[in-house]
Amino acid sequence: MTTPSDIQHQPERQRFTTRVDGHDAELEYRIDGGFMDITHVTVPDAIGGRGIASQLTLAAFEQARADGMNVRPSCPYAAAWAERHPEFSQLLG
C-alpha cells in the first residue's frame, strides 16, 4: 500500500508522484490564482485498485491546505474523491 511518505511532491513540475511495483502513478495540477486545479490523476492498471489515486489526491488536498490555497478538482476522479471526503469541503472553490 502506498503511504504518504512514498508520495513525492514536485512543485516545479506541478505534480505528485509515487512508484509502486515498478510503475509510476501521478497527479497533475495547475496553480491558477489562489487555486490548485487538479487536472489529472493517472494510475496504471497494473497497480490499480490499491487506493493509490486516493493517496495522491489526499496529498494534493493536504498540500493545498498547508499552502493556504483552495482546490478546484477539474479531474473527474478528484471531484468524486472530494465528494466522498467532506472534511475537505472548505477547500473547494
Image: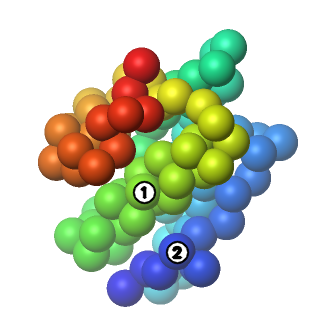
Tell which residue pokes out farthest to the top in this image: 33
Disc 1 on helix, strand or loop?
helix
* Res. 30 image quadrant: top right
The answer to whether residue 56 is seen in the rendering is: yes
Q: Residue at x 59, y 69 (%)?
A: 7
Q: For the residue marked with disc 2, what is the amino acid? A: Pro
Is residue 83 positioned above or below 31 on the image?
below
Residue 77 spot, x, y in % from top left = 27, 40
> Nearest the camera: 3 or 90?
90
Label annotation for residue 50? none
Q: Residue at x 60, y 60 (%)?
A: 17
Q: For the residue marked with disc 1, what is the amino acid? A: Leu
Tell which residue pokes out farthest to the right in this image: 12
Is residue 16 positioned above or below 19 on the image?
above
Q: Which residue does the numbered mark 2 point to in the structure image?
A: 4
Residue 40 spot, x, y in % from top left = 45, 36
